[in-house]
Amino acid sequence: MKKISILSIIALFFLASCNNDKAEKSIKTNEPSATKDIQKLDKTTVSWKLDQDASSVHWTGYKTTKKVAVSGTFQKFAISGVKPSTDLLKTIEGAKININVFSIFSNEESRDKKLVEYLFGHMMQTNAIEARVEKIHPDTQIVDINVNMNNHEKIVPMKLQVDAEKGLITMSGKIDLVKDFDAGEPLYFLHTACFDLHKGKDGVSKTWPEVGVKAILKFEKK
């Protein structure tokens, strides 16, 4: 009987040892999965930060009765009020853009000088165009932009495009210099200065008050 009891105790000891080894192995096996979960969490909490140097502001004017497009950019502008966020769209809530009109660039120096002298030069208090994000409508993909030019303010609805993979937010729309900003006189001076250049094959010279505008904001993951 004693031999049987001793053998039973030894057997129980080895069984307990085996069970402890299995438990330890089980715990060690779970450790890598916990690390993976933390890595996933880090990806979801990453913030977006504006890269102003990689961002751009574009414009498109029109001439002749055929409405021929003339496009360019503003090379100097300052973006403020952008807030780092895990939600790319929320970064631009309340953001402002101050655009230096003297930095207008159309790849033709004589045209740029005329735009500065005859268009912006005859506007009131327009060394810079100011724009502010007023309200975002994610459902309709529209953003309301408050634009201040020629001492007039106008809420301009713009189309909103968000590309999270590339970190891009694009806002594009159109303004009317006469209807929206009472810039009929400055437009007249520009038209007069460019009268012959804005003639089409029909011999009619026309400078359109409509201007296409677009801002492309580039963000990097922080």
Image (tube, rainbow, N blue to C red):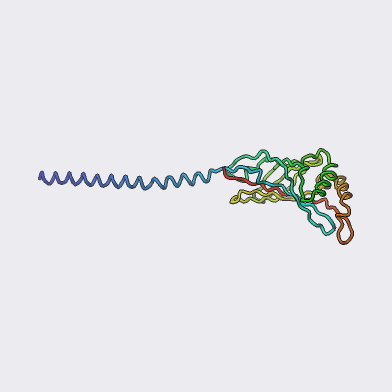
Q: Position of residue 187 (x, y in %)?
A: 85, 47
Residue reaching furthest front? Answer: 109
At x 68%, y 48%, the residue is 216
Marker count (numbered): 0
Q: Is residue 198 left or right of residue 57?
A: right
Q: Quadrant location of residue 122?
A: top right
Query: Which residue is at a point 79% across and 39% down the rendered structure image?
Result: 127
Classify the position of the N terminus by image quarter: top left
Closest to the observer: 101 or 146?
Answer: 101
| Image height of 151 relative to 197, above or below | above
Position of residue 156 in the picture relative to residue 163 (left or right): right
For the point 31% across and 45% down, the residue is: 23
Outermost residue, bottom side:
201
- Residue 181 locus on image (x, y percent): 81, 44
**Residue closest to the far left:** 1
User: Picture coordinates of residue 8 (x, y %)?
Assistant: 16, 46
Q: Which quarter of the rendered picture does the C terminus lie within? A: top right
Residue 155 in the image, given as x and y percentages of width and height: 75, 44
> In this image, 161 relative to 23: left or right?
right
